Image (cartoon, helix red, strand yellow):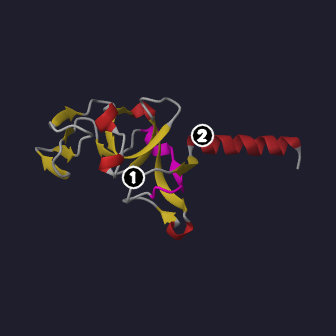
Amino acid sequence: MTLGTIFKSLCYIHVVKTYVIDPLGTFGPSMLPTIDSTASIFLTEKISTRFGKVDREDIIVFCDPQKPGRYLTKRVIGLEGDRITYSSNPETNDLVDDNFTHISYPENNDKPQTVVVPKGSIWVEGDNKSNSRDSRKFGPVPYGLIDSKIFWRIYPFQYFGPFWNK
């Protein structure tokens, strides 16, 4: 193998990892029960998120708005224009007047609050509402902070396979 072939191979790997598909390791309790709190490995795709193709219920990876350089994995709950109400009431989802309204648990907050997700942003929450730092804490996430969307679980091996609509 020549030096040129090695260099080309490394360039291809860099382009694919940066712009197409990237492996991701996750851990922590915020996405329980969907994602185990032990280490898991997924494949993420970056093409759809670059074109703003993010839907409710997608599990995405994005740059932490409060700690740049750190990435979080959360579920998309609301899109731009959606009304999000978070209160201490049990979680419910309702469709109201063609606008999606999501009611969620707050983090140490007894008063219900309602926000409208601004243009160019999404609302994200962890599935484990009582142990997740998400939009209820830092607000809507701009599309520019979205890195990728999870689509395939690699590890643990007993769950190997497609990972959409989870």
The crowd level at tag 1 (other Cα within 10 Å; few <14, some 14-19, many 20+) is: many
Any part of residue 142 in sight: yes
Q: In the displayed structure, does residue 54 sit left or right of residue 41?
A: left
Nearer mark to the viewer, of 1 and 2: 1
Task: Tell me the kind of residue under disc 2.
Answer: Thr
Question: Can you say whether 129 is above or below 164 in the image?
Answer: above
Q: Nearer the N terminus, badge 1 or badge 2?
A: 2
> In the image, what residue type sits under mark 1?
Met
Question: SS at mark 1?
Answer: loop
Which residue extends farthest right?
Answer: 2
Tell me residue 149's x, y (percent): 45, 48
Hey, which residue is sitting farthest front in the picture? 108
- Density class for disc 2 (Cα within 10 Å; few <14, some 14-19, many ≥20) is few
Q: Residue at x 72, y 40 (%)?
A: 11
Residue ID for mark 1: 31
Highlighted magenta segment, given as a residue range: 36-51
Q: Is residue 22 magenta?
A: no
Q: Is residue 110 left or right of residue 166?
A: left
**Rendered position, 144 above or below 57:** above
Residue 154 vs 129, above or below: the answer is below
The quadrant where residue 35 appears:
bottom left
Which quadrant holds the C terminus?
A: bottom left
Q: Nearer the viewer, residue 64 or 53?
A: 64
Q: Which residue is mark 2?
A: 18
Q: How many marks?
A: 2
Depth order, front residue of 33/150: 33
Residue at 51%, 60% (x, y): give it.
Answer: 153
Q: Would residue 97 appear left or right of 73 to someone viewing this image?
A: left
Q: Residue 15 at x, y = what percent?
A: 64, 40
For the point 17% across and 35% down, which residue is it?
114
Residue 48 colored in magenta in the image: yes
